Amino acid sequence: MGSVYEGPIQALIDELGRLPGVGPKSAQRIAFHLLKIPPEDVARLATTIVEAKRKVTWCRRCFNFATGDLCSYCLDERRDRTVCCVVEEARDIVAVERTHEFHGSYHVLQGAIAPIEGVGPEQLRIKELLGRIGDEGITEVILATNPNIEGEATAMYLARLCKPLEIRVTRLASGLPVGGDLEYADEITLGRALEGRRDL
Amino acid sequence: MGSVYEGPIQALIDELGRLPGVGPKSAQRIAFHLLKIPPEDVARLATTIVEAKRKVTWCRRCFNFATGDLCSYCLDERRDRTVCCVVEEARDIVAVERTHEFHGSYHVLQGAIAPIEGVGPEQLRIKELLGRIGDEGITEVILATNPNIEGEATAMYLARLCKPLEIRVTRLASGLPVGGDLEYADEITLGRALEGRRDL
């Protein structure tokens, strides 16, 4: 749409448009909203952003977000330290937690292997994962990277590294989403569902 | 999803979730993005927000956003001051400008009459519009409020006020969107298109 607004308005729209999932229309909508609401609400938003950034760091052990040295999962004594769920991003932990089915520890890779985007294994927290396997008595690593090309490649790579360590290495099952419709399933998902079929 | 994150992260997600069009999922996504990018980028976002809010006020004449006493349209000597396009919000000006068909002045009501939300005519910049009609020699008012219930009610209300002033009062045409499909038009729009049909 080009620069149709006066300086500070356009700067605001441009900055907001850099956020993930915020297109030019949404950026404009949010900008106009901010220009309309009371200044104290705007100040609080800006302060919350800066404060969160200042207070939140990485967990020294699992690389989840943390407000101290360790994240809440690593601090929780009730978690089973022998099973470690490996995810790409901190947000994936929340998805796993919502199942209420996992009570082990986590490890956040902080990405996935993506050669096209220049992300190789050395950019991920893989060395740290291998260190933990040695130090913490981990007996099973669940590879919970995304079921896409990058996630699969990362899982394959990690599986190859972990196998010689004589621990159990598992991968999340691929298949039809529960409540989904066979008719609308894409052929790759349906293929995976067939491949992974289970005896009843 | 409840408060599943540590304090500052949850506070950030909550603040972002208050922005228009940002649901809980998007708020989480933006929050995690901000926690991942360099601190200087986050600082720049926060500063831009606060700066925009500090520098941008209302145009004294038309109530568009302005960085000074008057907005860029009111400062522009080439605009035709005899025709005034009345819109609900400042963002609507941009939509009208994109047509390149209008070269008059604007007036921003800063809302529409919405009794359910407690917005009556006295909350809008209607008194100021009537003042301008008297002072500025406006000969036509184009009512460009939204084609929904609130916008129509506001247009009707304004038309009743402006008629005795012996100026031309017009309303944007309602009808089928260009490039749209008759088959998918809702009955109200199609009804309006019929009602407003033109001789060829």
Image (cartoon, coloured by chain):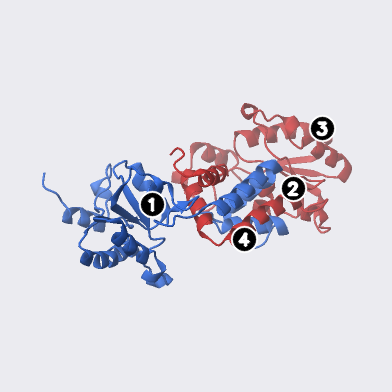
Chain colours: A red, B blue
**Crowdedness near tag 3: few (<14), some (14–19) or many (≥20) residues, C-alpha within 10 Å:** few
Report how far apart the C-alphas of labels 3 and 2 lie in the structure: 26 Å
Q: Could you say whether the residue bearing mark 3 is in a helix, strand or loop?
A: helix
Report how far apart the C-alphas of labels 4 and 3 lie in the structure: 40 Å
Q: Could you say whether the residue bearing mark 2 is in a helix, strand or loop?
A: loop
Residue at 53% x, 36% y is A188
Residue under numbered circle 1: B92
Residue under numbered circle 2: A64
Q: Which image quadrant for residue A168?
A: top right
Residue under numbered circle 4: B1
Give the residue at the far left of this rendering.
Answer: B199
What's under tag 4, amino acid-wise?
Answer: Met
Q: Earlier in the sequence, mark 4 or mark 1?
A: 4
Residue at 34% x, 47% y is B96
Q: Position of residue A13 (x, y in %)?
A: 52, 45
Q: Nearer the viewer, residue A77 or B180?
A: B180
- Which chain hosts label 1? B
Determine if marks 3 and 2 fall on one subunit: yes
